[in-house]
Image (cartoon, helix red, strand yellow):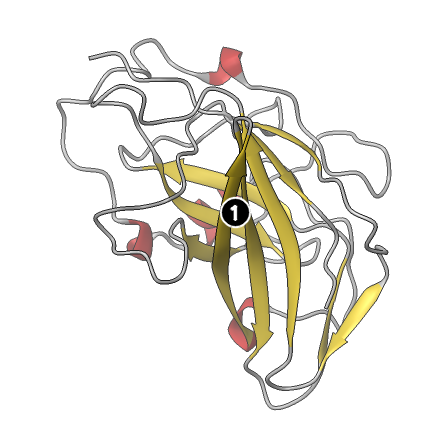
Amino acid sequence: MKRALGFLAVLTALPVLTACTGEPEAAPAEPGVTTAAPGHEELAPGWDESPDGAAPTPDEELDDAALSALLRTRATASGAEHCTPDRVAVTLEGFDQAAGHRYSRVVVRNTGDGPCVVEGVPGVGARGTWGTTFVNEVGPGTSDAPAGPVRLAPGERATSDLEWTGDLAGAEPESERVSLLVLQLARGQVPVAVPARIAGDTPDDPTLDIGPLTTVRLTPFRR
């Protein structure tokens, strides 16, 4: 059956892994901006039909290269003091909706033994329940938060507002929803794998109705 289009959009070029970092090459962009146009042309024929083949590799078994290949945009910031995936816990918390827009928050908590920094807008990508690499449009979020560094002591948290809108996934029974978000905290890093569920939801009833072409927006990190 045909599935509804989602609205999370990202880079227009297919990711190419670099030899040095294992991270996909970023498309040319204005410095400090992480946006991407819809990637309709990247979708293979039959992308909106439920697959009949073998089940995809589970999200939790994806290696660093596979996670990096999901990125559609790159983090705006970089630096030696920035938090790394092994020193943080990342969750999605809170949910609201209005006039076809959905809202949540990316929450990054420092779980390490020392301070680390988050800064600017994280890079983002997504994968669906059928194993599809989503090719969403990514736009800037609306926020008055400064894009400067946020220094986190152990146990402290920072947030980035997440908004998604457009043709929501789930309008048809067999449509593909997002199952995994990847968030890059700093350029050059392997992204953090974040199950696409609001904290407190059950695995069988996800709140995020993001699909392969849904529009997604993220704001700079703030306390």
Instruction: For the C terminus, give its image quadrant.
Output: bottom right
- Image-quadrant location for residue 48: top left
> What residue is shown at x 62% (from left), y 28% (from top)?
11
Tell me how many marks there are.
1
> What residue is shown at x 38% (from left), y 52% (from top)?
197
> What residue is shown at x 65% (from left), y 37% (from top)?
25
Mark 1 element type: helix
Note whether 7 is above or below 81 in the view shown.
above
Note whether 97 is above or below 78 in the view shown.
above
The picture places residue 35, in percent across and down from the top left corner, at 71, 32
Q: Furthest-front residue in view? A: 98
The picture places residue 102, in percent across and down from the top left corner, at 52, 37
Instruction: For the N terminus, give its image quadrant.
Output: top left
The picture places residue 200, in percent across and down from the top left corner, at 35, 62
> What residue is shown at x 30% (from left), y 55% (from top)?
61
- Residue kind at label 1, given as amino acid type: Ser
**Residue holding disc 1:** 68
Q: Nearer the viewer, residue 157 or 73?
A: 157
The picture places residue 185, in percent across and down from the top left corner, at 65, 58
- Residue 2 lies left or right of residue 138; in this view the side is left
